[in-house]
């Protein structure tokens, strides 16, 4: 049966039916022998309680029996697992009376602990579970059976509440970890047999464990050692390694615990430090330091094992993962005890040189770069070359690996505090980083929103904004690049919904090669290119799902970009960005809905730039006039046009910039008047939709503002407003303007006409001084502003009454 159908059926079960089923479960659990019927009933109950997001109510008797069954010493493991799963689904629960105080079996303790830890920590469950786990750990020998069920519990408790562990408990676990990590058996385990004539005496004796390349292991056992069967201490070795980094961080967050730590750190870099670290007998060290020493040896052994050629793909993948973990562990060890630093440097330098030529293990380059960022200054090692190679190679060649892309961006974000003078490398590499974003935008958008403020500066802001606007085009270019590249086993499939786009052959034309190279550049070039020809070339790819997803992420990224850049942008940079917004508003890659969404962001950010630097309007008067006068389609750029017109009306004034002249005001008036006449007189058609009323009302308001500052224009704008009011009240039979739109235009025209009857009041209301923004002008009824507003309101209301009459 389909899983969706099963879940749907279980969600529809009503409370009455559930209570009847609970009664059946109770009867089954009360039997002395719990057979297959009990297993089937508990499986069904688990499906019911897990199929919904809300907590299903179970009978108290049923809950009590589930807890009793879980704690029963002779209960079959399958039933205990089902009881655990059901109780966890009901967490947190107030009617739980489960306790781990008397549980001796480590497997059963791990199940009970998983239920208790899921409750939160209302009754100090984390502390009680931790103390019980350590008591069981203390009562068994290191080689005792089933201790591996206990380590996940200890690891979870350490993560949730490290402060609950006593020093003797910390030392105990550190000693056990040393034994499991360094002294696990090097012989393979004995396979479990069912007995019989051909059992143990004639069975083949287990041989030694082997390396991943099949050679017999000559050194101690690690997670990369292989064999047919494993002993208990070998399983504990694997578990100990998996929790080692977390334990080192939680058990010694402030570094090594030995009293001579400061002396060692003062001597780091000296010959004495190296000699003392290598000559000290490890068995004389405190437990924490001894654990660090053995962890260091373990990591070195893993790095050596990673050089071997694995016979199986699973072992090869495990090598890559263990190599990453080993480097991360070495980073922790060197942070906690600097005496490890100089023993680690030569090892990691050699490892880095080897990995640079091995594309299959490129993931390990990230923790190596992190290591040199953290310790490069202390070790007098320049990490610039390592970072330069990292940022140049990985995004270019492996942008299509989603896991690597995510890890790479997280590395950049998390390493920001330690980049220091290398931050320029990160900033110059933003075109390469954006390849990861373009190809994996749904998964990486939030990470880039956090990263953008550190990527952008005054030197790269303009180029970065161009790149953000062209991000969907970059996605299409990367798709094209994959289609044109030689076939390899590692190359991902492109979007097969478009098998042979027409742009494949055209892209080889030399006239497009330079544009493609600019779009796919690895570092900031300091220049920009007009990519309109490339937009047309890649248009067949605009409907690809990956391109559309990238286009949906761009507005969010633009908001993050402007939030960061407006914090440091001066007048010159603001002017550059404003010009870029005007220029790019009609030069975007044509993805469905992309232009409209981007225009909304660009228009709002244009107004933000104007508000921060009002003189922008006067300084860019020529460009703004050209923009307003060259708008061929009001409908396609409504948001941007409205923002520009509003900004002109708001900031083209002597009160904002003393350089503003009457000639500029008159020139803007003439251009805007012609535009308003054009949009109101043009007849709507299928190819030319009607002009939105918002554009008309903003144009009328801006014309009125300009006329209030150059009063010779008042008769012209009054006449025009009168015509607009008449036109809105009596639309032509062929007009497509609806009544609501016409009413809005008519009301605004009447209000503006009323204001212009009192030019001094109009100028005060439409061009208020900067002091008006102060709170006292809005609180004190004796100031001029409230009085003026009340006067104007009465005039407007009177005029509106005459219109209605």
Image: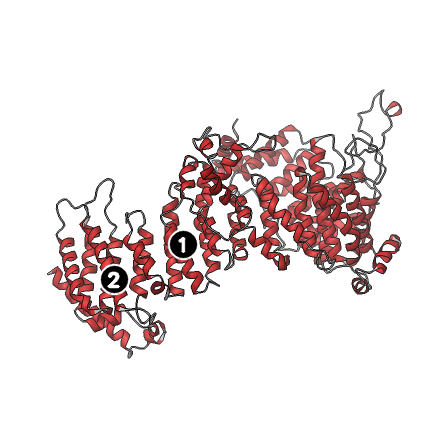
Quadrant of the rendered image containing residue 498: top left
Tell which of 740 and 469 is nearer to you: 469
Residue 36, percent across and down?
Answer: 65, 28
Q: Secondary structure at mark 1?
A: helix
In the rendered image, residue 331, in percent from the top left (x then y), is placed at 72, 52
Upstream in the sequence, badge 1 or badge 2? 1
Whether residue 404 sits left or right of residue 175 in the image: it is left
Q: Can you see residue 146?
A: no
Residue at the extreme left of the image, as rendered: 805
Residue 557 higher or lower than 221, as above or below: below
Where 489 falls versus 465 (above or below)?
A: above
What residue did someone put label 1 on? 580
- Residue 224 x %, y %: 76, 38
At x 43%, y 65%, the residue is: 571
103 or 611, which is in the foreground?
Answer: 611
Q: Residue at x 10, y 61 (%)?
A: 805
User: Taking 657 as reference, is 319 above or below it?
Assistant: above
**Mark 1 Cα-neighbour bin, 10 Å: few <14, some 14–19, many ≥20:** some
Residue at disc 2, secondary structure: helix
Tell me the tag on residue 667: 2
């Amino acid at each position: 049966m389909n899983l969706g159908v099963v879940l749907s059926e279980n969600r529809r079960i009503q409370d009455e039916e559930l209570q009847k089923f609970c009664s059946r479960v109770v009867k089954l659990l009360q039997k002395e022998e719990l057979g297959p019927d009990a297993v089937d009933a508990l499986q069904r109950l688990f499906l019911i309680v897990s199929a919904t997001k809300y907590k299903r109510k179970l009978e108290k008797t049923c809950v009590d029996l589930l807890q009793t069954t879980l704690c029963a010493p002779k209960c079959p493991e399958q039933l205990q697992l089902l009881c655990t799963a059901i109780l966890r689904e009901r967490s947190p629960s107030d009617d739980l009376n489960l306790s781990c105080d008397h549980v001796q079996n480590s497997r059963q303790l791990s199940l009970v602990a998983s239920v208790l830890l899921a409750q939160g920590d209302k009754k100090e469950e984390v502390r009680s579970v931790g103390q019980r786990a350590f008591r069981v750990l203390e009562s068994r020998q290191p080689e005792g059976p089933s201790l591996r069920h206990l380590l996940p519990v200890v690891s979870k408790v350490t993560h949730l509440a490290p402060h609950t562990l006593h020093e003797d408990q910390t030392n105990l676990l550190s000693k056990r970890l040393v034994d499991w990590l360094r002294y696990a058996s090097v012989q393979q385990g004995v396979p479990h047999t069912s007995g019989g004539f051909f059992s143990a005496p004639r069975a083949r004796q287990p041989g030694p464990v082997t390396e991943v390349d099949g050679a017999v292991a000559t050194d101690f056992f690690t997670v990369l050692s292989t064999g047919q069967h494993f002993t208990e201490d070998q399983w504990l070795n694997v578990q100990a390694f998996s929790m080692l980094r977390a334990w080192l961080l939680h058990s010694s967050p402030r570094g090594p615990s030995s009293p001579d730590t400061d002396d060692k750190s003062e001597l780091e870099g000296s010959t004495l430090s190296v000699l003392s670290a290598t000559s000290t007998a490890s068995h004389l060290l405190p437990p924490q330091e001894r654990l660090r020493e053995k962890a260091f040896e373990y990591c070195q052994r893993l790095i050596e094992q990673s050089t071997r050629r694995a016979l199986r793909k699973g072992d090869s993948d495990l090598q890559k993962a263990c190599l990453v973990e080993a480097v991360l562990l070495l980073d922790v060890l060197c942070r906690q005890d600097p005496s490890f630093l100089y023993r680690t440097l030569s090892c990691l330098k050699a490892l880095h040189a080897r990995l640079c030529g091995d594309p299959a293990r490129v993931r390990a380059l990230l923790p190596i770069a992190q290591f040199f960022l953290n310790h490069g200054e202390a070790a007098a090692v320049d990490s610039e070359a390592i970072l330069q190679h990292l940022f140049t190679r990985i995004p270019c060649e492996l942008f299509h690996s989603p896991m690597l892309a995510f890890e790479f961006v997280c590395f950049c974000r998390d390493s920001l505090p330690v980049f220091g003078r290398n931050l320029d490398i990160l900033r110059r590499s933003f075109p390469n980083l954006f390849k990861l974003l373009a190809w994996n935008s749904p998964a990486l958008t939030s990470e880039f929103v956090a990263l953008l403020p550190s990527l952008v500066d005054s030197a790269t802001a303009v180029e970065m904004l161009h790149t953000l606007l062209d991000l969907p085009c970059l996605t299409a270019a990367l798709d094209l690049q994959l289609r044109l590249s030689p076939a390899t086993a590692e190359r991902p499939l492109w979007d097969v919904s478009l098998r042979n786009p027409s742009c494949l052959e055209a892209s080889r034309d030399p006239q497009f090669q330079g544009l493609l190279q600019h779009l796919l550049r690895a570092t900031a070039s300091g220049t920009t290119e007009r990519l309109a020809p490339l937009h047309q070339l890649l248009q067949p790819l605009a409907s690809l799902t990956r391109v559309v997803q990238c286009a949906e992420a761009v507005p969010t990224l633009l908001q993050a970009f402007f939030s960061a850049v407006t914090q440091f942008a001066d007048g010159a940079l603001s002017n550059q960005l404003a010009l870029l917004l005007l220029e790019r508003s009609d030069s975007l890659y044509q993805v469905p809905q992309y232009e409209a969404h981007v225009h909304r962001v660009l228009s709002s950010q244009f107004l933000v730039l104007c508000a921060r630097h009002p003189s922008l309007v006067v300084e860019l008067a020529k460009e703004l006039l050209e923009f307003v006068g060259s708008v061929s389609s009001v409908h396609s750029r409504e948001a941007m046009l409205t923002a520009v017109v509003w900004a002109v009306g708001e900031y083209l004034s002597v009160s904002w910039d003393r350089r503003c002249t009457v000639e500029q005001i008159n020139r803007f008036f003439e251009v805007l008047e012609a535009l308003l006449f054009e949009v109101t007189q043009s007849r709507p058609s299928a190819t030319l939709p009607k002009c939105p009323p918002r554009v008309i009302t903003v144009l009328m308001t801006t014309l009125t503002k300009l006329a209030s500052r150059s009063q010779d224009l008042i008769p012209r704008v009054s006449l025009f407003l009168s015509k607009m009011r008449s036109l809105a009240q009596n639309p032509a039979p062929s007009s497509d303007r609806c009544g609501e739109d016409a009413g809005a235009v008519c009301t605004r025209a009447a209000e503006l006409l009323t204001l212009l009857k009192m030019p001094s009041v109009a100028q005060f209301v439409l061009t208020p001084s900067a002091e008006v923004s102060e709170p006292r002008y809005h609180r004190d009824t004796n100031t001029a502003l409230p009085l003026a507003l009340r006067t104007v309101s009465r005039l407007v209301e009177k005029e509106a009454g005459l219109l209605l009459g």
